[in-house]
């Protein structure tokens, strides 16, 4: 493997390990810190209210159940 490819693969591995280590509360804190600069505070507030329920629902789903939920939401929001 060339030097560039090897370094790129190493960087991807490091990013993957870092992302895997972020918990839901940590992610929430990171997003909250960006309210007003990267995220609309009103949208963030609405998301924070519904996020725990969504997290619990998705934590119990297998891949097929997640696909079904996504399909239902797409149909609902886009009138399909």
Image (spheres, rainbow, N blue to C red):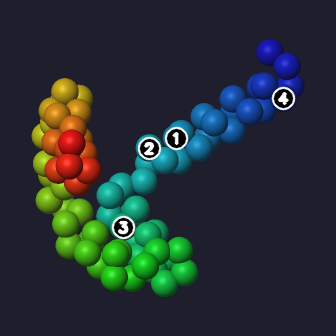
Residue 7 image point, x, y percent: 78, 32
Determine the CA span between mark 2 and mark 3: 15 Å
Residue at the spot of label 4: 4
Q: Are marks 1 and 2 in contact (CB under 8 Å)?
A: yes
**Residue in front for this viewpoint, 28 or 63:** 63
Residue 5 image point, x, y percent: 78, 25
- Which of label 2 and label 4 is nearer to you? 4
**SS at mark 1?**
helix
The label shown at residue 20 is 2
The label shown at residue 28 is 3
Would you call the spot at circle 3 few (<14 residues within 10 Å), some (14-19), or many (20 or more)? some
The residue under the point 19% across, 66% down is 50
Determine the CA span between mark 1 and mark 2: 5 Å
Residue 38 image point, x, y percent: 53, 74
For this view, does 41 lie left or right of residue 19? left
The picture quadrant where one finds residue 51 is bottom left
Residue 20 appears in the picture as rendered = yes
**Residue in front for this viewpoint, 64 or 20:** 64
């Amino acid at each position: 493997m060339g030097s560039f490819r090897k370094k790129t693969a190493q960087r991807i591995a490091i990013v993957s390990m870092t992302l895997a280590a972020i918990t839901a509360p940590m992610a929430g804190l990171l997003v909250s810190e960006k309210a007003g600069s990267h995220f609309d505070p009103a949208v963030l507030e609405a998301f924070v209210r519904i996020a725990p329920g969504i997290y619990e629902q998705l934590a119990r789903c297998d891949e097929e159940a997640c696909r079904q939920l996504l399909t239902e939401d797409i149909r609902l929001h886009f009138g399909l």
